[in-house]
Image (cartoon, helix red, strand yellow):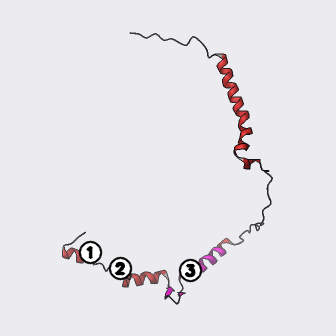
Amino acid sequence: MTERVDFERTDVPPGLLAKLAAGIAAFVIAVPLVMPLIYPQTRQSRTPRVPRIAAGAVVLEVNPRARLAQLEQADSAARDRYGWIDRDHGLVQIPVARAMELLAQHGLPGWPAGSSEKDQLQDGSRH
């Protein structure tokens, strides 16, 4: 019942190792020579080009808190103002809080008027 443990009695043939080494060397040499044939755009010169439009210098914000306050003020002024968007079509801009009040009072135009949950409980029809 005991199995006999045995090991290989021969090594890898030296010819096989030589063929594998030669194949790897040929691959390493051939790949850089063949790649420009497959990808011709790699033959172009790699000199860096001067940008056509020079970017402006980075400006350091001297007082970032004042800049943030200015941006927030401009944002709230745009958000809280009344004005015409398209007078011909009757589109106006109103503050968000006022729009929410109007929707709560009148609902969306064309939206079916829903009954309250209390009315549904009295009718006995519950979804």
Q: CA distance from mark 2 to mark 1?
A: 17 Å
Q: Which of the labelled discs sits on residue 117, or is there none?
A: 1
Mark number for residue 111? Answer: 2
Mark 2 vs mark 1: in front: 2
* 24 sits left or right of 72 in the view: right
Q: Residue at x 70, y 46 (%)?
A: 39
Residue that appears at 50% across and 83% down: 95
**Residues drawn in magenta:** 66-94
Tell me the residue that label 3 is attached to. Answer: 76
Kind of residue at disc 1: Glu
The answer to whether residue 85 is magenta is: yes
Real-space Cα distance between discs 3 and 2? 30 Å
Name the quadrant containing residue 115: bottom left
Q: Residues within 10 Å of mark 2 (few under 14, many from 20)?
A: few
Q: Quadrant of the C terminus?
A: bottom left
Q: Nearer the viewer, residue 16 or 116?
A: 16
